[in-house]
Image: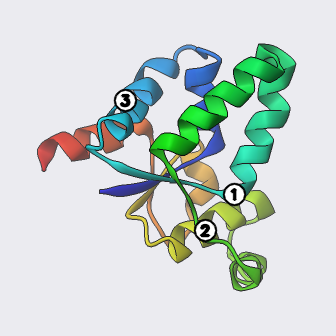
């Protein structure tokens, strides 16, 4: 199974955000063990840096980004990807970019806590707990 990790899933782990961190950490753990393949959108890296350094500091954030890049692939992004996002049925452009990167990267699901934001997506969005449940059924 191949999933795109939305920024909120990673922040749940990094910032131990309750009540979400447990399921997000379990999902990221499966990625670390190579039980699930994961992709992140290119803009997720800069967003995580921007938000992470405010709470965790520059050094810690860079270390976490390095670890993330060791276990996840950076999703496919190009001019075509952004043009696809502009034509998306999703009302939020950032979510549309997530969708477009997911399609271009040929993922199975988008891992996010904002399921409602992806109702009109070409790909199914699932919460981390749902992905863990699907993976254990395989």
In the rendered image, which residue does mark 1 sit on?
Answer: 42
Q: Position of residue 24 (x, y in %)?
A: 46, 29
Q: Which residue is drawn at 37% across and 35% down?
A: 32
Q: Where is residue 112 in the image (x, y as percent from the top left)?
A: 54, 44
In the rendered image, which residue does mark 2 sit on?
Answer: 101
Q: Which of marks 1 and 3 is nearer the N terminus?
A: 3
Residue 113 visible, this angle: no
Q: Distance between the residues labelled 2 and 3?
A: 23 Å
Q: Answer above or below: position of 61 versus 74.
A: above
Tell me: 71 left or right of 86: left
Which element is circle 3 on?
helix
Which element is circle 1 on?
helix
Given contact means CB atoms under 8 Å apart, are the residues at marks 1 and 3 in contact?
no
Q: Position of residue 45 (x, y in %)?
A: 71, 46
Q: Residue at x 74, y 37 (%)?
A: 48
Quadrant (top left, top right, bottom left, bottom right) of the N terminus: bottom left
Q: How far apart are marks 2 and 1 (CA)?
A: 9 Å
Which element is circle 2 on?
helix
- Foreground residue among 71 and 36: 71
Q: Answer above or below: position of 101 versus 137.
A: below
Q: Quadrant of residue 29?
A: top left
Front of the two marks 2 and 1: 1
Q: Answer above or below: position of 101 versus 18.
A: below
Q: Earlier in the sequence, mark 2 or mark 1?
A: 1
Tell me: 34 left or right of 118: left
In the rendered image, which residue does mark 3 sit on?
Answer: 29
Q: Position of residue 73 (x, y in %)?
A: 51, 55
Given contact means CB atoms under 8 Å apart, are the residues at marks 2 and 1 in contact?
yes
- Foreground residue among 117 and 138: 138
Residue 29 visible, this angle: yes
Given contact means CB atoms under 8 Å apart, are the residues at marks 2 and 3 in contact?
no
């Amino acid at each position: 199974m191949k999933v795109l990790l939305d920024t909120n899933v990673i922040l749940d782990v990094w910032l131990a955000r309750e009540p979400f961190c447990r399921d997000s950490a379990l999902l990221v753990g499966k990625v670390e063990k190579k039980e699930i393949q994961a992709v992140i959108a290119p803009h997720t890296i800069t967003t995580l840096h921007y938000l992470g350094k405010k709470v965790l500091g520059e050094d810690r954030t860079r270390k976490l980004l390095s670890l993330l890049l060791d276990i996840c692939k950076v999703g496919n992004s190009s001019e075509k990807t952004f043009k696809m996002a502009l034509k998306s049925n999703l009302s939020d452009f950032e979510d549309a970019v997530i969708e477009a990167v997911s399609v271009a990267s040929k993922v199975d699901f988008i891992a996010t806590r904002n399921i409602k934001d992806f109702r009109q997506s070409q790909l199914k969005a699932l919460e981390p707990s749902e992905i863990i449940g699907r993976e254990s059924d395989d």
